[in-house]
Image (tube, grey):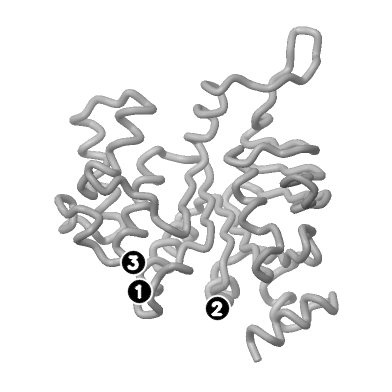
Amino acid sequence: MIQAHNINKWFGSLHVLKDVSLTVNPGEVVVIIGPSGSGKSTFLRCLNYLEPINDGYIVVDGRQVGKKKTAGGRLVDDSRKNIYRLRSTIGMVFQQFNLFPHQTALENVMEGPVTVCKTAVSEARKKAELMLEKVGLADKADAYPIQLSGGQKQRVAIARALAMQPKAMLFDEPTSALDPELVGGVLAVIKDLAREGMTMVVVSHEMGFAREVADRVIFMDNGSIVEESSPQQIFTSPQHPRTREFLSKILG
């Protein structure tokens, strides 16, 4: 479903991603862990071209992201329209929710299908109601973001992404901005998606969640993938000294 090949990303002279390669199969859940500043979130944003890459290439569902081939076989930058269209097939959930404050929960979830996909309002409303029910917020359809807790806002953000019927979901530390008592509700929704077979890449500091849900765990440090393996291997017998050092500080 997702293939990243030798991705490099610079911010000025700062080399943030260094030859990062990753393949995510359909229905697979990959959790990326690592210290702050290791490039995890930047890599996630590159996967749907919110951050253009400087070198390497990314393929999602058979299509190269951000590039297209000319009739002569040369790669050129893709049009914004095509990038937006491809991006709409990859759901993204951010740390800070990014809901529209002037819209209700229902209107936030309807916005993408109506504006991007040109779905009829009546159909988008039905779909949005189903998505809010899916994340346990059917009773909050008419509430504005200011009336919702952090955990409820994040679940609305997940419903909004799901309303676009994505082929894969990207989660950028979806619980990092939440009070500890609100984390469980958001993680429960993500676990349900995993059980349903949604392809997901999740950047998270929740080690228990990674151990329970991930098919593979990726450890990143200093812009590179240091180690990747099953949760069992990573958490009980990490092979790389840097992985062991990180987990010893996190898990004690």
Find out whether the residues at labels 1 and 2 contact each other: C-beta distance under 8 Å.
no
Q: Is residue 50 visible?
A: yes
Q: Vertically, is 97 above or below 227?
A: above
Q: Earlier in the sequence, mark 1 or mark 2?
A: 1
Name the mark nearer the viewer: 3 or 2.
3
Q: In terms of sequence position, does the residue under pointer 3 or pointer 2 come before the other?
A: 3
Residue type, mark 3 in image: Gly
Q: Earlier in the sequence, mark 1 or mark 3?
A: 3
Tell me the quarter of the picture where residue 223 sits: bottom right
Q: Which mark is residue 182?
A: 1
The residue drawn where x is 74% and y is 76% is 233
Amino acid type at mark 1: Leu
Count neighbours of disc 3 (C-alpha within 10 A) and say few if under 14, some if 14 to 19, many if 20 or more: many
Q: How many angstroms separate mark 1 from mark 2 (CA)? A: 15 Å
Marking on residue 61: none
Q: Secondary structure at mark 1?
A: helix
Whether residue 82 is situated above or below residue 150 in the rendered picture: above
State the separation of the CA atoms marked 1 and 3. Answer: 5 Å
Q: Amino acid at mark 2?
A: Gly
Could you tell me residue 69's position as x and y percent? Answer: 73, 17
> Circle 2 — which element?
helix
Q: Does any portion of residue 129 appear in the rendered image?
A: no
Front residue of this view, candidates 122 and 245: 245
In the image shown, does 88 or 102 lie closer to the viewer? 102
Where is mark 2, residue-wise? 208
